[in-house]
Structures are given as C-alpha cells and as structure tokens.
Amino acid sequence: MKRYSAPLDAVRRRFGTWHDPVPALLAATRPTDVLHHDVHELAVPLPSYTAGRVALLGDAAHAMTSNLGQGACQHFRTRSSWPPRSRPSPRPSRPSPATTPSDAPRSQAVARAARRAGRMGHRLTHPVAVAVRDAAVRLTPFALAQHGLLRHHAWPPPRLTPAAS
C-alpha cells in the first residue's frame, strides 16, 4: 500500500474527475478532515483463538479486509460458562482447554473470499483486466450474482447454550 503525506491529494487524484458533485466536495474538503488508516489482515489463520484464560475476539482473531463487509459480523461460540453467574464467584471461571471457535472455518472462508474480492476489485488496475472483470460482472445472471453476495450475509449465527451449573 502506498503511503501519502497528504491523503486528500491521493483522494483528489483518484476521484477528482468523477461526476458532479464529487469534484466540488473534494475542493471543499480540508486536508485535516481526511483520515488515512491502513487496513491489516491475518493472511494466515490462527490455529486457535484461545490460550489459557485469554480469548481473542473480532479482528484480533480473524482480521480481514472489508471487501465483503463481514469483519465485524463473524461470531464466536465457546463451551465456557454461559450465562455469567448471578453472584460473584470466588474464582474467575476459565474457558475449558477445549474452547475453540466453532466458526473458525466460516470466518477463514469469509477472509479468503474478501481477499479474492479485493484482488478482483480495487486492487485490479490493468485496463484489460478491469475491462474483462467489468464485462464478466455485466454478463453474470442476477440470481448467480445475488447468491454469491448473500452467501456470507444470509448466515444465521449459532445459538449459545448455557453450560450445566
């Protein structure tokens, strides 16, 4: 990823020739109003989301690009004590050694799909490759495109069940 000393200049280079009102909005934007944050992903999945009493959740466990809008929509299920006890316990409960992310295969599949979408989306720059991609998108039947888009979005999370007291 390129680093810019002035993120607004990069945005203006990329979008300054778009249709109205985009150029006017960019002209009215102050450089201090533009934030630049790098996006990081875990290209190699973690073997486990837990170690002892520590459990990784969210992007700490399965950081992925935002190409599918699914990073925050991954779910974690554990076999530790659920629900929390109503009165304080003398000892904090510990996740069992068998605590594993039940959705690790799903989150890893979504991360791979997001990475592929990025390669075919904003990272694709060669004009011929962009033209082929755009033609393929236009020629894809709606039902097939919809199925591909909803494959990750229409997933119901697993139900958490209380552990025996």
Image (cartoon, rainbow, N blue to C red):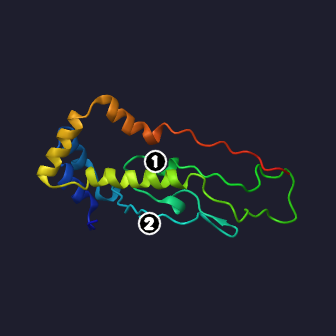
Whether 4 is drawn above or below 65: the answer is: below
Q: Circle 2 sits on which residue?
A: 44
Is the residue marked by circle 2 packed among few (<14), some (14-19), or many (20+) residues within 10 Å?
A: few
Whether 96 is drawn above or below 143: the answer is: below
Q: Circle 1 sits on which residue?
A: 70
Q: Residue 38 in the image: x percent, y percent?
A: 37, 63
Which residue occupies 52% across, 39% down? Answer: 155
Q: Would you say residue 17 is visible in this rendering?
A: no
Name the image quarter holding residue 42: bottom left
Q: Residue 25 in the image: x percent, y percent?
A: 25, 44
Name the front one of labels 2 and 1.
2
Q: Are marks 2 and 1 in contact (CB under 8 Å)?
A: no
Q: Residue 55 in the image: x percent, y percent?
A: 64, 63
Q: Is residue 86 left or right of residue 25?
A: right
Name the one closer to the observer, 56 or 78: 78
Under mark 2, the amino acid is Val
